[in-house]
Image (cartoon, rainbow, N blue to C red):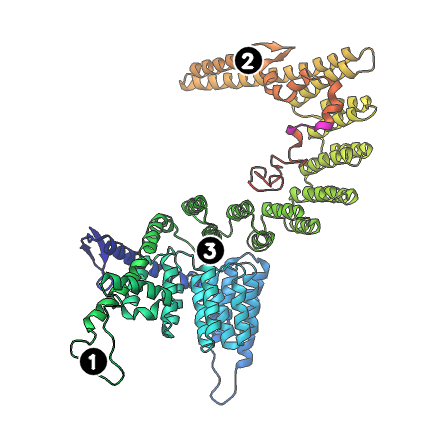
Amino acid sequence: MFKRRNSSKGDTSEMEMPSSPALSAMIQEEILDDDYSKEHEENDDMMDMIYQEEIEIQNKETMDSDGEDATHKRPMSDGASEDEPSSKKRTNEVDKLWKNVNDNPNDFQAWTLLLQHIDQVSDLDSGREGYDGFFARYPYCYGYWKKYADLERRKGTKETTLKVFNRVWKPSGLVVDLWLHYMEYIVSQYPDDELYVRQEFERTIETCGLEFKSDKLWESYINWESAGKRWKNVTQLYERLLATPTSKYMQHWQKFQEHVKKHMPSEIVGVDEFLSLRRAILIELNRSDSETPDEAPPGVEAAPGDEQVGTNVDEETKALQKSIITARQKIHETNVTEVKALWSYEEAIKRPYFHVKPLEKSQLNAWRNYIEYETKQGREARIKVLYERCLIACALYEEFWMRYIRYLEEVGAAEGEIKAIYSRACEIHLRDKFRPHLSWAAFEEEKNNPDRALEILQEVQERILGSLEAWMQAAGVERRRGNLTAAKEIYNSCLTQCQEREDKEAHSHVSLKYARFLSMFDDDKNRALEILHEAHEYNKNNSSVLLALVDLCLSCQPPRFKDAELALREGIESSQSPGTRLMFAHRFFHFMSECGQETNCVSEGLRVLREVQQEVRQMDSSTSEADTSSITSKQGEASNSGISVVEPRREKRASQDKTTTGTVNGTSTTTTQSMNSNYQNYQHTGYGNYNQGYNQGYGTSHYQGWGYPAQQGGYGYGQQNWGAYGNYYGQR
C-alpha cells in the first residue's frame, strides 16, 4: 500500500499497488514526477523568494527617508513630468547598492539586491553593467541569466540577445530550463529556418541530453518535429530518448507506442526497416506475393471476390506497428535497468542548483557516491556530464574541481579541455583558494608554458597574502628554466614581504629555503651563510635556523669549524626552552669531540653539557617544589574543610613512578625522554658525515616542503594540510 495526496482536497487516500510491474513503475514515476515538477517550479523563482524580504525592507527604508518611493511616481496631470527627480532618486538608490557591492564584492546578498533594483528599473545600460559584474563571480545563477536575456530581448537586439545566451554555455551548459528558454526564443525568431532550428536543438541535446532530468528538452524537440509532421524524425528521436536514462522513462515509452499506433508504419520508419518488417509480417500471415491476387486493369472493376479484404490490410498494419514497437522493446528494457541503478543516487541529490550557502555533509557524500559509481561504469560521456552537474551545486568546493581535473588527466583529455576547467575554477569560483592555482601553474609548466605559470603564481601572491607556496613555486619555475637571477629576486621579495607583515616564522622558513637554494644551485655559500645569520638576528627563537647554519658551515670546503662552534654556543645561550638548550648542549659536546681543534675541546664540550644539565635539573627541582607546595596548601585547605587528599597524592606519586625511574648524567629521565626525539640522532651520528648530510638535505623535521623534487608535507604557516591534498604541486 502507498499513500498519494489528493492536491484538490488536501487529503491522503490509500491505494493498492497494482500487480503489473510496468503499471507500477508508471505510477511510481508519476508520483516522483509530481514531486520533481513542484521542486522544479520552486527552484525557478528561488532567488527572488529568498531576497524578497530584503527588497521590501529596502524599499520601505527608501520611502521613509524620501517620503515616497521613487519608482512609484507618476507624471503630473498638467503635462509636467517628475522624471528628473525620480531619476535622481533611482540614481541614488543604485549608487548605494553599487557601493555595497564594491565594498564587498563577495557579498552575494548585496549583488542580488542590486539586480532586483535593476530589474525593476529595466534600464539596458545599468542592467548590462550589473549583470556582467554579477556573472563574473556567480555564473551558475541561471535564473538571472534568463532575466538578462529577457532584458536584451525587450531593450536590445536579436544579436545582443543571442550573445547573452551564448555566454551562458561557457561556464556550463547543463541547465535544462535555460536551454528550454533559449529554444523557445530560437523557434519564435526563426520559424522558417528548419535547418538552423534543428541544428540548435541538436546542440541542446548534445550538451545536456544525458542529464537525468532533461526530459523537457527531449519533449520540446519531439513536439517541434511533430508540429512539422516529420514523423520519421520523431521516431528517430524516440529511439535516442528510449536509450537515455531520464526521470520520465516510462512516460516516454508510452508516448512512443502512442506515436507508432497513430500513424501508418511507412510514415514513421525508414524504407529499409519498413520493407524488412513487412516481408516478415507477410510470411507470418501466409501471404506471399504469388498468393496476392492481381489487380484489375485501369478502368475495370475487380470481379466479385477478387477485391482486397480491408480487414487483412488492417491486420497487416497492426502487425507492423507491433513489430516496430517490439524492435525497440529491448532498448527500453535495458534503459529501465539503468534507470533503476541510478534512481537511488538521483533521489539523494536534494540541491542540484547553485547557492552560496554551504551544502550539508550528506549532500557532499551523495555527490561523491554518485561520481564513484559512474566512474566504475567507465562511460566517459556520462561521467563528464555528472561532473558538470556536480560542479554547479558544488562550485565552491575545490575537492570536486580537482577530482574532475584528475579524471580528465587519467583519461588523456585534450590540454585545452583541462585548461578550461582550471580557468573556470581559479578565475571564477575558487579565486581565494591557493591550491588549485598552484596545481594549475604546475600543469602549465609541464606543458612548456612557464610564463603562464608565473602569471598564475603572481596573481596568487597578490590576491592571497601570506601564501608562501606561491612564492616558492615561482622560484622553482625560474630555477628549472635556468633563470637563477629571477629566482633570487623572488626569494628576496618574499623575505621583504615577511618583514613587512612582521611574520618571523615565515621569514625563518623562507630563509632556510633561500640558503639551501644559494648553496646547492648558485654555489654561493657565503651569501647563504649571510641569509641564515640575518634570519637568526630577526628571529632568535627559531632553532632550525641555527641548526641549518651549523650544517652549512660544516659543508663548506674547507669546513668552517669556528663558525659552527659559535652557532652551537648561540643556540645554548639564546634558546628559552630548557629542552632546546639541552639538545644544543648535546650537539655541542659531540661536535667538540669529533671536530674540535683544541686539546681541551672534549673537556670543554663536557663542561658545557654538564652546566646545561645542572640548570635543567634545578629547573625541574623548582617545578617539583612548586607542585609540592601547591599540594600542601591544598591539603591544608582540604583538612580545614574535611576533605581528604590522600588518594589524589597517591595517584600522582604512582604516575610519577611510572614516568621517572632515575637520572641520566644528572638529568631526570623524564626530561631526557621528552628531549630524546630532538637529539637522539646526534648521539649516534658523527660529525664526520655532515658534509654528506648537508648535500643530502637538512632533514624532514626542519625542511619539509622544499619541493626538491617533491613536497610531502604542509608548510604550516596559515595554510594547513596542503601536503595532504591530492593534486597539489609536487604530486602531479
Report the residue marked by disc 2: 660
Which callout, 1 or 2, points to the residue nearer the camera? 1
- The question of residue 279 being in magenta is answered with no
Q: Which mark is residue 355?
A: 3
Q: What kind of residue is marked 2?
A: Thr
Report the residue marked by disc 1: 302
Q: CA distance from mark 1 to mark 3?
A: 75 Å
> Where's residue 175, x and y in %?
45, 61
Is 322 located above or below residue 394 in the figure? below
Q: Residue at x 55, y 13 (%)?
A: 660
Label 1 Cα crowd, 10 Å radius (few <14 / some 14-19 / many 20+)? some
- Magenta part of the protein: which range? 695-700
Mark 1 or 3, nearer chain start: 1
Q: Label 1's element?
A: loop
Q: Dividing the picture into quarters, in which one does residue 554 lie?
A: top right
Which callout, 1 or 3, points to the residue nearer the camera? 1
